[in-house]
Image (spheres, rainbow, N blue to C red):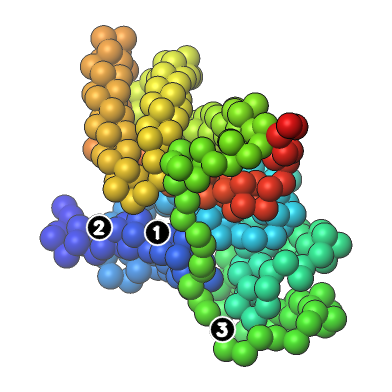
Amino acid sequence: MQNTSDILIFWAVVMARFFVPLSIPKYPLPGIIASLLLDAVDQTIFQLFTDLPLEGYQGYDKALDIYYLAITYLSTMRNWSNLFAFKLNRFLFYYRLVGVALFELTNLRLLLFVFPNVFEYFFIFYEAVRMKWNPRVLTKDKLIITAAVIWIFVKIPHEYWIHIAEMDTTDWIIENPANAVILIAWAAVMLGMAWWLLRDLPPMRPGFSVAAHHATFNFDGPQAARVRDNYTSKRFFDDFIHHELIEKIVLVSLLSIIFAQILPDVRANDFQLAIGVSILNIINTELSQWLARRGTQWRSIVREFIVMSIVNLILVLLFDFFLARYEGSIDLLNTLFFILLLTLNVTLYDRYRRVHIWSHIAITNLAWPKRKN
């Protein structure tokens, strides 16, 4: 029987893994490193300080991994000034997300090797550069080479080690301490490659800041109206909304599929899950899109999160009710936790996508042709 201290430790770790990633948009590098460390040590904490059966934590662990990776990607909409770096990182994020979704549907570990998590390390590289340089000094060639180096020399060996060979690095070093030398040499080679990539950049600026800075815009306020007055922008404005909607559908669909597949204690067939995910996807996308048009200040974002949480709570309760009529069931508490993660990701998407549009479209006047007199 689980004692009180075990439960307290469990929820302390889960809450840390929930709240720490929320620091990533404001403090990208410390936030992502802290999230990585928590992901690395959480199960060790449980092994050392509790008697909990870790099998029950696997679903939470996978969901929290995807949750903090999604927040990491969404923070690039808020913060990144290098547009090519953003587009490349967006591809790397969705490439990994597709791989995870396929893995959860098929349980083929090879898919995690074929769809490596290059995105996370590329993000760390960019944010490390940003602390000492304007990231716009990173050319397309440097960014592509960086992604290729991470893909080939970092993530392919790492994904093979974990998902194909299924080996544990700690156990490997304990079995033969000399193996640590191999890891040190490998790390030195990676640092050498990083130096080679950055060797011809301009001089570093004095000091550094771990906090990201961005401008907050009211996408539907007077400033947007002035942009529309000065440009034949209504069509382009609607195009951007359309593209935003498409990406949101993709994001919500992939997150919903992954969360639905890793939910513990679910007694539902694939068709029932598909119906539930589809309904959740449609309502979340349409409702959050409608709410997002009403403003992007913190007050409206909090309101959106509350409204979306209530709507999703009702949807889960209805799904649970109807599923029971067809000899299925879900663990209500677990499902609500997963839905909370999804709701927060969708809410942050609504906020930061609009900031990204203003930063790279409206302010720079890119793709906004002037009105003909």
Which numbered tag is attached to residue 11? 2
Do the CB atoms of the residues marked 3 and 1 lie less than 8 Å apart? Answer: no
Q: Is residue 60 above or below residue 108?
A: below
> Residue 42's x, y, as percent?
39, 64
Instruction: Report which residue position mark 3 lands on.
Output: 208
Badge 2 marks a residue whose secondary structure is: helix
Q: Is residue 267 above or below residue 142?
A: above
x 58%, y 41%: residue: 227
Find the distance from the CA under tag 2 to the CA under tag 1. Answer: 17 Å
Q: Residue furthest front?
A: 373
Find the distance from the CA under tag 2 to the CA under tag 3. Answer: 35 Å
Residue 54 lies in quadrant: bottom left
16 vs 354, nearest the viewer: 354
- At label 3, counting other C-alpha atoms closer than 10 Å, the crowd grade (few under 14, some 14-19, many 20 or more) is few
122 vs 4, nearest the viewer: 122
Which numbered tag is attached to residue 22? 1
x 82%, y 60%: residue: 140
> Residue 259's x, y, as percent?
44, 36
